[in-house]
Amino acid sequence: MVRREGFSHYGGSKMALSFTTATGDGSTTNFSVPFQYLQRTHVCALVDEVDTSFTWVNSGTIQFDTAPADGAEIVIY
């Protein structure tokens, strides 16, 4: 996990801006969300800099419908 400098304010709460990165392998669809968030709707994902939809498997894992391509840059924030 990489922690970005700075803070965000959600409903008066001060939280560090956090994100994690991964690299696609063409077959993995589940990725960890190893940081705290207030609501699931506050978490977003980019695959090769494109907003990409996902579903929640559990409170710490998201799943893409299609596995990101081999070498694709994944950012979950």
Image (cartoon, grey):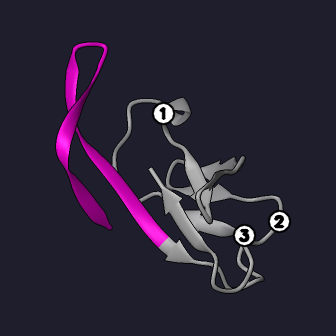
Could you tell me how far apart the alpha carbons at marks 1 and 3 are, in whole angstroms?
Answer: 20 Å
Q: Position of residue 11 (x, y in %)?
A: 31, 13
Image quarter (top left, top right, bottom left or bottom right) of the N terminus: bottom left
Amino acid type of the residue that numbered disc 1 sits on in the rendered structure? His
Q: Residue tagged by mark 3?
A: 29
Amino acid type of the residue that numbered disc 2 sits on in the rendered structure? Thr
Q: Give the range drawn in magenta.
A: 1-21
Q: Which of marks 1 and 3 is nearer the N terminus?
A: 3
Q: Residue at 63% of width from left, 85% of height from top?
A: 71
Q: In this view, does 52 lie above or below 21?
A: above
Could you tell me how far apart the alpha carbons at marks 2 and 3 are, in whole angstroms?
Answer: 6 Å
| Mark carried by residue 6 | none
Amino acid type of the residue that numbered disc 3 sits on in the rendered structure? Thr
Q: Residue tagged by mark 2?
A: 66
Q: Main secondary structure of the magenta part?
A: strand
Q: Residue tagged by mark 1?
A: 42
Whether residues under marks 2 and 3 lie with C-beta atoms below 8 angstroms apart, the answer is: yes
Residue 3 sits in quarter: bottom left
Q: Residue at 45% of width from left, 69% of height from top?
A: 21
Could you tell me how far apart the alpha carbons at marks 2 and 1 are, in whole angstroms?
Answer: 22 Å
Q: Where is residue 35 in the image (x, y as percent from the top left)?
A: 35, 53
Q: Earlier in the sequence, mark 2 or mark 3?
A: 3
Looking at the image, residue 41 sits to the left or right of residue 17; the answer is right
Nearest to the observer: residue 40 or residue 3: 3
Instruction: Tell me, yes or no, whether the highlighted magenta stretch contains residue 24.
Output: no
Looking at the image, residue 61 sits to the left or right of residue 26; the answer is left
Q: Position of residue 74 (x, y in %)?
A: 56, 67
Label 1: few (<14), some (14–19) or many (≥20) C-alpha neighbours in 10 Å: few
Q: What element carries label 2?
A: loop
Residue 31 sits in quarter: bottom right
| Farthest-out residue, top | 11
